Amino acid sequence: MADKATELGEFGFAGDDRVVPFQVEGLDVRGRAVQLGPLVNTILARHDYPAPVARLLAEAMVLTVLIGTSLKFQGKFTVQTKSNGPVDLLVVDFSTPQDVRAYARFDEDALKTAVEEDRTSPEALLGEGVLAFTIDQGSFMQPYQGIVPLDGTSLEEIAGVYFRQSEQIPTRVRLGVAEFFDRDEEGHPRRGWRAGGLIAQFLPEAPERMRQPDLHGGDGDDGEYVFSEDDAWSEAQVLVDTVDADELTDPQIGIERLLFRLFHERGVRVYQPQPVFDRCSCSREKIKGVLKSFSDEEIEESQEDGAITVTCEFCSTTYRYEAAEVREV
């Protein structure tokens, strides 16, 4: 007798690289959760990033996927950092409804020093700078960008600040990354990556219940505030904070089982999972369109052996153009 296929709501139904929307009606909480397996592993392996850089970029990928899959339009959502740390640039693009690409830039010498001095937390690798969340709905709409300072706090905390500033929605984010080692088909050892995350938001029917304590006013703000947070949101935050990074990445637990562990006493409902894929938006024609802006002098300087070679920083695909072909554009 054939095994019965799993159905929506059963443990293991979603699997890897599928974002699971959920709702906890007893706490007025909605959210999304995901475990990334082949997607994050393929992107990181493509560039062979050092482990600290890979962990940081994987966190950014999970965060981007959790937010990007909530968008209801055709367009692009981008998370990008620009900072003075050893990893001075992270870029993760999510093209709705399901395509992901990611890239990290780092200084090898600064990273080596950071590793030797045991300064490899995400906050230390990024340093000071900004994290930008950009929503682009296409050529007929003005892009929206929210900018949050990188001030030594984690990506989880920064994401909470972003939602608080841009949407005034109480939000809690958890991110986890795990490195694993196994063997390939020929028995050779290999390194791999998994990542996972959860975003929970407090969305009661009465908007006044979403009230949060005032943000600090900056230098000179020594005010003391008396604030009483909604009990339902307080309980939800406590539950979300019990999640361990291992639970977020362990394939034996899975998203449905994790959500059940967290919220079963309050009743958690899951919805159809949304798949996400490792797909770059570059193409031969798009890059050719960029080259058309080159002057004859720039074309001459860019070519080697009569051709111009361009490699995509995201997917590492290399495109070769004959100089005469570019001039024709």
Image (cartoon, rainbow, N blue to C red):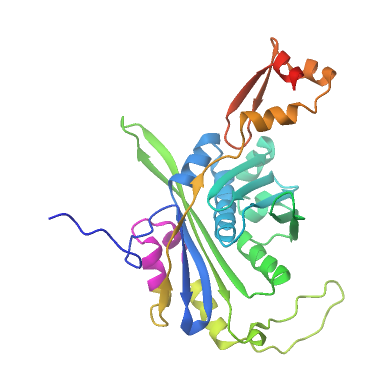
The extreme right residue here reads 220
- Residue at image location 66% in from the left, 51% down from the top: 78
Q: Quadrant of the C terminus?
A: top right
Is residue 215 left or right of 249 when viewed as pictured?
A: right
Residue 260 position (above or below residue 247): below
Q: Position of residue 5 (x, y in %)?
A: 26, 58
Q: Position of residue 85 (x, y in %)?
A: 71, 47
Q: Position of residue 191 (x, y in %)?
A: 43, 40
From which residue to which does the magenta span run? Answer: 243-260
- 136 or 155: nearer the viewer: 136
Residue 143 position (above or below residue 108): below
Residue 151 position (above or below residue 37): below
Magenta span includes 246: yes
- The main secondary structure of the magenta stretch is helix
> Image quarter for residue 171?
bottom right
- Residue at image location 80% in from the left, 28% down from the top: 293
Q: Quadrant of the N terminus?
A: bottom left
The extreme top residue here reads 305
Q: Is residue 102 visible?
A: yes
